[in-house]
């Protein structure tokens, strides 16, 4: 799964700057929250956001998410697929169709 | 870039539940923030988190991030690579090495 | 409860700028998340943060939280006290003492 | 400023549970972000949220914000008022009126 080019490039970027020392799991989790809020800021006062900014902030979220997945020794796209199987069971089609309620309120 | 299987599976999951109606860019951005905070909650009182929970919450962040990328018509891994080029310029190795300061304070 | 000066000043500030139109409950909730992440950013790479910045970001969180409370027609400090009664029951002293676990895991 | 009852009650609550050991500035900042996202979750798919839940989640944000202010040795309502003076200068009425743009784009 996944394209090894992304990991190769991300690892080289971090190594060249000697930044692995800052990338504890906790710091990466904080960083994902911080970048997610910058993404949310594109939509702070309106649903109509600047696309270029949205792409850049989403890229930052994805970058830290990939770094955390790599730190955990898992493939980011595999994580998505594994979780999707659980979510498919939690939200069976016949109950969840057209419904945005949480699984425990379906 | 990226593995088309993930997108194929995510799109089928959403379509079977008729959930595209809820997935505005803004709602996906909110969802990424919400899931990021659930990931952060694994580290609320300590840096030593339960790995299974961390993987599950990270999977949720990645899932919504992929859905937003797909909504924007861009490939998630391409986004990372494009942004990385900008970040490499903002944080030149000779200034950023071993330093966690923001680019405007290097 | 609370000091009416804060509300008087906040309302005058908003009214002078005609900003009530932007302050839906949802937009205020997004704003609280955005400002919380700026507060978190003070601690992104270390627990040792710049106090002036922390105070400013905390002030922003509090400001939006007060505006949302006012929008809901409730007093911010009363909200804290009401919730505290619930939390005291959820976390009885004999079980919660010295323990950071969530109430459902005590 | 502020009502001393809130601080008295919050401090007693924390002390009875011996929780000050968990309340580093950083952990409180994380907690504010986590609770802010639970507040945001009330609005995940729609601007029309359950008022009881909104009040409860806002109370949690306020509680941790007050605990952090207390940890910093500052009064929460004073913080709001001090920051308001800065914000009034950053957003002069003649430029900011009816405009949700950020100060550097006014």
Image (cartoon, coloured by chain):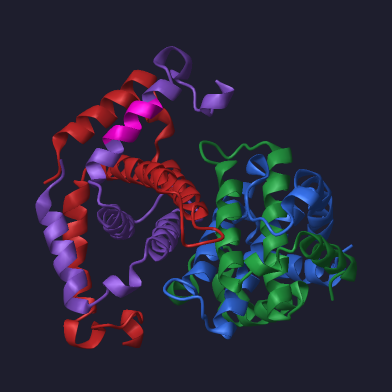
Chain colours: A purple, B red, C blue, D green
**Left or right: where does residue B72 sit relative to residue B42?**
left
Residue D13, relative to residue C59: is it above or below?
Answer: above
Report how many numbered discs are placed on residues in the image: 0
Residue B3, relative to residue D11: is it above or below?
Answer: above
**Left or right: where does residue B84 sit relative to residue C80?**
left
**Quarter location, residue A20:** bottom left
Q: Give the quadrant of the N terminus of chain C.
A: bottom right
Residue found at x 31% / y 87%: B106
Magenta highlight: main SS: helix
Q: Is residue C34 visible?
A: yes
**Left or right: where does residue C4 sit relative to residue C66?**
right
Q: Is residue A82 magenta?
A: yes
Q: Is residue C36 magenta?
A: no
The front one of A59 and A86 is A86
Estimate the x, y position of residue B19 in percent, counting from the top left. 40, 26
**Quarter location, residue D80:** bottom right
Estimate the x, y position of residue C70 in percent, counting from the top left. 76, 56
Q: Is residue C74 visible?
A: no
Estimate the x, y position of residue A59 in percent, counting from the top left. 27, 57
Estimate the x, y position of residue C8 in percent, counting from the top left. 81, 68
Residue furthest top as drawn = A94
Q: Give the quadrant of the C terminus of chain C.
A: top right
The front one of D69 and B14 is D69
Q: Which residues are magenta?
A: A81-87
Residue found at x 48% / y 15%: A95
Residue found at x 70% / y 59%: C98
């Amino acid at each position: 799964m996944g394209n090894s080019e992304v990991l190769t490039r991300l690892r080289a970027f971090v190594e060249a700057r000697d930044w692995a020392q800052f990338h504890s799991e906790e710091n990466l989790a904080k960083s994902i929250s911080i970048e997610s809020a910058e993404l949310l800021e594109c939509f702070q006062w309106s649903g109509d956001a600047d696309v270029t900014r949205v792409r850049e902030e989403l890229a930052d979220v994805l970058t830290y998410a990939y770094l955390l997945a790599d730190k955990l020794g898992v493939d980011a796209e595999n994580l998505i697929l594994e979780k999707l199987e659980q979510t498919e069971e939690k939200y069976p089609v016949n109950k969840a169709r057209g419904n945005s309620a949480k699984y425990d309120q379906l």
